[in-house]
Amino acid sequence: MENKSPAFVLVRPQMGENIGAAARSMLNFDLDRMRVVAPRDGWPNERAVALASGAGRVLDAAQLTATTAEAVADCTMVFATTARDRDLTKPVYSPEGAMAEARDRIARGEKVAVLFGPERTGLENDDIVLANAIVTVPTNPAFPSLNLAQCVLLMGYEWRRALDAPAAMQMELAGTDWAAQAEMEALVAHYEERLEEAGFFFPEAKAPAMRRNLRNLWSRMPLTRADVQIFHGMMRQMVRWKERG
Amino acid sequence: MENKSPAFVLVRPQMGENIGAAARSMLNFDLDRMRVVAPRDGWPNERAVALASGAGRVLDAAQLTATTAEAVADCTMVFATTARDRDLTKPVYSPEGAMAEARDRIARGEKVAVLFGPERTGLENDDIVLANAIVTVPTNPAFPSLNLAQCVLLMGYEWRRALDAPAAMQMELAGTDWAAQAEMEALVAHYEERLEEAGFFFPEAKAPAMRRNLRNLWSRMPLTRADVQIFHGMMRQMVRWKERG
């Protein structure tokens, strides 16, 4: 599929109505790259099709995956729509800032995704740590909740607005390219595995938080493919060194 | 009522559901001055109240009038949300421009209203000529239609943005701070030393370039003090692991 706009990823959506409304909101702003992760009621979803009236082709072309990681495997920049979390060190964009960033990166050939959480609970921490940045809609703190389709609508609106404005920055990429999520995932797994073996995640009670923090750290690193190879190489060398005894 | 925000005027709204959803969208962005012109199903409207869940007070405080002219009688600036009409000579604002204008005028003590048309037909010419300007949401020409609550949501969002003018990106720094150069330098030295010992910089002829690339990689990483400690910890653990043999 042509890489001219961000993919909007609905993570574990519940109501078909909301999926259909999200498709309409996307098409209102000329977005047609939907991805759906583990929808509660299976796929295709009849209620979604009924409610998409006129935007059915967005659903027809939607890509279905079992996990969030698969849905963003080919992407080099992933935004998570969620309230800011004071416990995670992460860039926090406004919708306007995020879509301007998305526009600039897509213009440079990158692939960008935006994650939207399930209706009731929103994105989980395991989804959020996969994202490179957070997008927060500045709502009234006393009445903050937006539904899924409303959130999609606002991001789509800002995408459309961003297209009308000029780009701001370019990156010199000395003969390499940004690492895609799948490559980052392999790097994270490599380090986790070796560090596990080396007894890094200790004590046991703290291990999940340590893993989450480490994963979140990687998510913020703007690594090229060459960088990823350097990190792999460093770890491999440490292991060889150990094995030489 | 205090004149601190624009009045949102629903002109001849039809479905109670949409009135309730509009109330919620208003309160999402801290707007509470609703006016309702000749609602099809009378007033108060039970369906509206049911759908407003949590935003009922916006409906309770709404002002009911029989005509659009009465609803905007006290206002000095009236915007009509509608597609632009090539047959009317009129200022056409973007949602952003309109709400920035509204903010400036309200700050100077003026009263501002925004008109929203009935669901199916939109505002009629008789309503539009009462307005001083048009606001048009830049939707996909091939799929332009927004419903009433969506239109209210976007205008509310732009009102809130006009008040906040938030930075495009901020960083949530979960209880830590950016690493200073001296800390980065110590990290670079730690890795260089251990990797040297482990035989990473090989062959000799390539070692200077490898060192330079690694240093350049670190220079691009936006690391916090906590991140730096995690990297130190990983390397220390690999060394301990090796030393255990």
Image (tube, coloured by chain):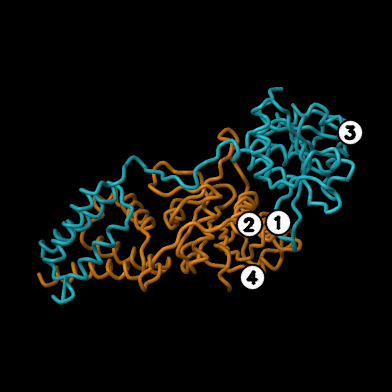
Chain colours: A orange, B cyan
Which kind of residue does numbered mark 4 sit on? Ala
Quarter-wise, where is residue B64 in the image?
A: top right
Kindly identify which residue carries mark 4. Answer: A61
Between disc 4 and disc 2, the foreground one is 2
Are marks 2 and 1 in one subunit? no
Instruction: Determine the CA span between mark 4 and mark 2.
Output: 20 Å
Between A184 and B111, the one nearer to me in the picture:
B111
Say if mark 1 contacts mark 4, CB within 8 Å.
no
Residue A160: assigned label: 2
Question: Does any portion of residue B17 appear in the rendered image?
Answer: no
Q: Chain of mark 4?
A: A
Q: Chain of mark 2?
A: A
Kindly identify which residue carries mark 3. Answer: B67
- Above or below, B173 against B57 in this view is below
Residue B139: assigned label: 1
- Above or below, A159 against B14 in this view is below
